[in-house]
Amino acid sequence: MPIASTSRIRGKGRPTTRDSAAASLGALLNLIRSGKATTRQELERESELGRAVVADRLATLSEIGLIVESELGIASGGRAPRLVRFKTDLGCILVATLDQSALGVGIADLSGRLFTEHHEAIDLGADAASTSQRILALFDWLIAKHAPDRPVWGMAVSVPGPVSEGDEMPFMEKTPSFLPAWEGFPFVETLVDRFGAPVWLRSSIETMTMGERFAGAGQTARNMLFIKVGKRIGAGLIFDGRLYRGAQGASGLIGQMPVQAGDRTSTLDALAGSDMIAREGLAAAQSGKSPLLADTLRRGGDVGAIEVSQAAQSGDPTSMEILGISGRMIGHSVAMLANMLNPDLIILSGTMAQTNDLLLAAVRETVYGESHPLVTRDLIIAKSQMGSSAGLVGAAMVVVESLFEPGCLKDWIVHGTPLAHPVFLALRTSCATKRAGLAAEQDHQAIAP
């Protein structure tokens, strides 16, 4: 490998030649991978490295197999430059989203682009082992159908609640607490041992925010608020182009904010979430205040948040007012966030927000009315167009961003694969040992009298 190496310490705090070379290799690869530079001239300009250094590093990246330099670009007064491209087909990324009643899986290339996705109903409160086995089976199916010859470079799973661990080390070493029914189950260890690749767990609001950032309306926004409206109301924050997770991975729990509606004081979840919409809609149906909802109830149909939303779309005044109350309540909280954070863009997601313009209109009216003029001058408030794909796309981008983070990248780039990262090699051995111990314990329990 054409990278000079030395074990001699070159002074306190100064990197070795190998470390310096790995850092410059990583910098160039990230410029190529992100599309910020696609020719040698652009790489020299963006990296501020000399021509000889860029040529040497490109030769190394090509020899490792991470890039290809073949196609000719557009000439600008001279010979057409060769385009440099990251080889996104070197491996694949497996992703999954776990919701209380639904499971989604997908497979992506190393740019985070999904090949395909699959969704099905589940009961997340059921046995963790059976749900885990279903995820393994679906991952096997995706690999066999779409990437039989590609190694898995990483996996990410979106889960309903906050994930408080995962930022201290480049790779997750154990399964964090994320659901009571999964407490003590070695989910991360099972995935690592089965597919031989690192795993990341992130909250659903974080993965959806990442999905919107990289493939939705937030692609050009440097600072974005993502608001998910459902039974619980949560927020994701893109700050200066990057996801902000907070100290414990629990940023954005705005549903716990205290709010007041008339003489009632409770949380935003309780007074503006889908449970409130369903509760008020059922009361309006039972009292006859909403003839449309009353007719639905009389015919034996359910009256929930979806039915209230549909009735509002049909012009039912009571249903429109229920959604307006929810939207204004959410708008009050979002306006406080907007005044503090000054985002470029606010995206509303969730069934209520994506299927009904009345909720979006109420949020817009409140935010624009209660925010400082400088905050709202160029602020865009829109609803998400990504639906259930947002979490899967975002999960894939969690893997991409983590693998190609400069601190992680420099430790595996000379090997051409993150699966050779020294920390991950040790982690994989540890996970295999834990899984073997668990299997032995289960066998012992099975044969015990």
Image: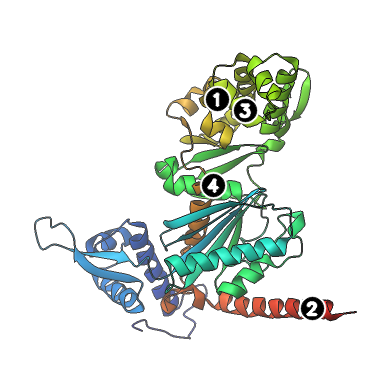
Mark 2 or mark 4: whose residue is earlier in sequence: 4
Residue holding disc 1: 367
Q: Earlier in the sequence, mark 3 or mark 1?
A: 3
- Asked whether 370 or 215 is in front, the reply is 215
Q: Nearer the viewer, mark 2 or mark 1?
A: 2
Determine which of the numbered discs, if any, sits on residue 441 in the image.
Answer: 2
Residue 218 location, quadrant: top left
Name the residue beneath numbered marker 4: 208
- Badge 3, how many Cα within 10 Å: few under 14, some, many 20+? many
Helix or strand or loop: what does disc 3 sit on?
Answer: helix
Query: How far separated are the C-alphas under marks 3 and 2?
Result: 49 Å
- The picture places residue 410, in percent across and down from the top left corner, at 46, 71
Residue depicted at x 62% and y 66%: 172
Looking at the image, which residue is at 43% across and 65% down? 146
Residue extending furthest right? Answer: 449
Q: Name the residue type under label 1.
A: Val
Structural distance between the alpha carbons of marks 2 and 1: 56 Å
Instruction: Point out the residue furthest to the bottom here.
Output: 7
Residue 286 in the image: state x and y as whole percent.
75, 19
Badge 3 or badge 2: first in the primary sequence = 3
Q: Label 1, label 4: how many angstroms apart (C-alpha)?
A: 22 Å
- Indicate which disc, 2 or 1, sits on the residue closer to the N terminus: 1
Q: Secondary structure at mark 1?
A: helix
